[in-house]
Image (cartoon, rainbow, N blue to C red):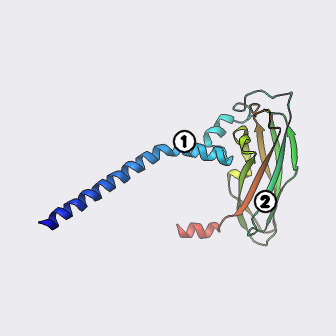
């Protein structure tokens, strides 16, 4: 009789744990949207919603008007992981822009190996307080880049700095960390 009561308790406890797990997963599903927005804001990556708001011209979400009385210096930088035999660098290391205007700059990537390699650029903004005021409308960092052996390619970055950027920030740095992506064929075979 004692064993029956103990088995019922275990079943009840298992049922409660599973119900709690299902409820937790349901709640986490609702929390994903704000968590994704927070992650995008902290890392400097634009969410899909921000990119859609920007549209083609890029000035709609940035306040609409160009601030003719102010200049902001944007420094550009790229660091390549030692495991990736590429060189990546901006064609211009520093550009001056007026808040609200859209600017196009080019980065040059070169695969120094004799074989095809895929890489991914991860952006970050410094100071971090400027992250929400910097918008990338077109960026090579949005997708993985595959370069053939010894290939050299220019990659575009189209961006805008918001006129709402705090007045004490007159310079910011956009840095890319470029990492090697595992062989696409090996990933496809593993799935």
Picture coordinates of residue 120 (x, y %)? 70, 58
**Residue on which the image places disc 1:** 34
**Residue on which the image places disc 2:** 79
Observer able to see residue 135:
no
Picture coordinates of residue 164 (x, y %)? 74, 31
Q: Name the residue: 32% across, 52% down.
A: 19
Q: Dot 2 lies on which element?
A: strand
Check whether the beta carbons of the residues at disc 2 and disc 1 lie within 8 A of each other: no
Q: Name the residue: 72% across, 36% down.
A: 56
**Is residue 160 shown left or right of residue 187?**
right
**Is residue 58 shown left or right of residue 187?**
right
In the rendered image, which quarter is residue 145 located in? bottom right
Real-space Cα separation, disc 2 to disc 1, in angstroms: 30 Å
Q: Which mark is residue 78?
A: none
Q: Assess disc 2: are there few (<14), some (14-19) or many (≥20) residues with their C-alpha within 10 Å of its C-alpha.
A: some
Work out whether residue 183 or residue 88 is closer to the camera in this orientation and state it.
88
Q: Dot 1 lies on which element?
A: helix
């Amino acid at each position: 009789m004692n064993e029956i009561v103990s088995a019922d308790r275990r079943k009840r406890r298992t049922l409660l744990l599973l119900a709690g797990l299902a409820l937790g997963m349901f709640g986490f599903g609702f929390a994903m949207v704000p968590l994704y927005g927070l992650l995008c804001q902290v890392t400097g990556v634009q969410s899909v919603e921000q990119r859609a708001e920007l549209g083609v011209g890029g000035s709609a979400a940035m306040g609409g008007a160009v601030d003719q009385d102010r200049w902001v210096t944007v420094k550009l930088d790229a660091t390549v992981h030692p495991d990736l035999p590429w060189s990546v660098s901006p064609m211009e290391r520093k550009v001056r822009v007026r808040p609200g205007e859209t600017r196009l700059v080019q980065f040059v990537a070169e695969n120094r190996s004799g074989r095809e390699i895929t890489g991914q650029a991860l952006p970050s903004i410094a100071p971090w307080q400027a992250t929400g005021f910097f918008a990338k409308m077109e960026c090579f960092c949005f997708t993985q880049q595959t370069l053939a052996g010894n290939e050299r390619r220019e990659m575009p970055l189209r961006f805008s700095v918001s006129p709402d950027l705090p007045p004490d920030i007159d310079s910011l740095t956009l840095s890319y960390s470029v990492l090697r992506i595992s062989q696409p064929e090996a990933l496809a075979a593993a799935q």
